[in-house]
Amino acid sequence: MNSIRYKLSGVTCSVLQAANFRPAYIQCRLYSGPTSFPDFFKNPIFRKEEQAKLIEINELSKLAISPVKPPGVSETSSVYYDPLVNKLINHVMKMGKKQLARELVEKAFENVKRIQIERYHLASSAEAKAKIILNPKDILHQAIENCRPLLQLLPIKRGGIVYQVPAPITEKRSLFLAIKWLLDATNDKERTIHFPQQFAWELLDAANNTGKVVKRKQDLHRQCEANRAYAHYRWQ
């Protein structure tokens, strides 16, 4: 069997030709990635936890007949895959060096694990030991949740004056700000302290609802509370 290659829309397609088969015109639509699909394509649901939630509310059967985008290269149904950790690695990455970013995050998790194990062995009672979280991923989730703001300030111009108007924030934006603030606090350090060590301490402080990032979130909420008189400018 001979292999014949056709170029359709700039994409090379391979078609197998049998001895008594003549190739005809092939009409197909190929996409370069998950972001290039039309809007009516659904995002893939490949995590068992998410599928179980959809089964409980009887929504999975509705998605069975809908067109679905393919998952990304880094997305998998493995128990070791965490979307938040993957997003954090992408934020840490610079100039496409994802392997280096992954190593830095893993070293930070290792430092968190060592600090928590040391605290666990130094705890005097069983109740104190039970309160100590040993899983670095759980600490990351808790830290991100404590750092996510609930409001934001939007600059709105009225009568030649720019007002800082408080407004609700979306979940995607609040997650972005939480990760960005954690990395900004980590990079604002002495040159002698490496990234994994400083990031581990920032995660532990944020998980305990303390530290610079939590203070920054609280300052933002105070500014929103102080500017609540301008909230009506959102609808004008």
Image: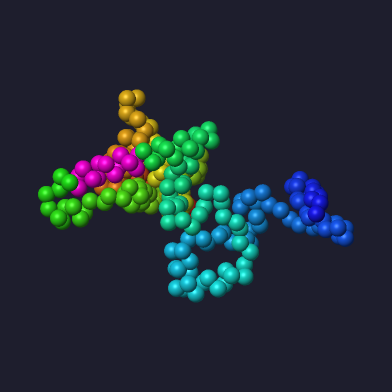
Confirm whether the magenta stretch covers residue 76.
no
Q: Is residue 106 visible?
A: yes
Q: Residue furthest top?
A: 191
Query: Which color scheme did the rendering employ for the protein?
Result: rainbow
Residue 114 sits inside the magenta stretch: yes
Q: State the image coordinates of residue 53 (x, y, percent, origin top left).
A: 44, 68
Q: Is residue 219 left or right of residue 86?
A: left
Where in the figure is residue 41, as x and y percent of width and height?
Answer: 62, 61
Q: Residue at x 78, y 54 (%)?
A: 15
Counting labels gives 0
Residue at the spot x=27%, y=41% of the render? Answer: 114
Q: Please, what is the dominant secondary structure of the magenta stretch?
A: helix
Q: Is residue 186 left or right of residue 116?
A: right
Q: Residue at x 59, y 70 (%)?
A: 64
Side (left or right) of 12 relative to 52: right
Percent across and percent down for residue 22 are 88, 58
Direction from residue 10 to residue 100 in the image, left or right: left
- Which span of residues is magenta-colored? 108-120
- Residue at left offset 20%, top offset 48%: 120
Measuring from the top left, give residue 230's x and y in whole percent. Answer: 41, 49
In the rendered view, would you say 188 is above or below 87?
above
Residue 130 location, quadrant: bottom left
> Foreground: 91 or 233?
91
Quadrant for the N terminus, please: bottom right
* Residue 231 in sight from this viewpoint: no
Question: Observer-nearest residue: 6 or 202?
Answer: 6
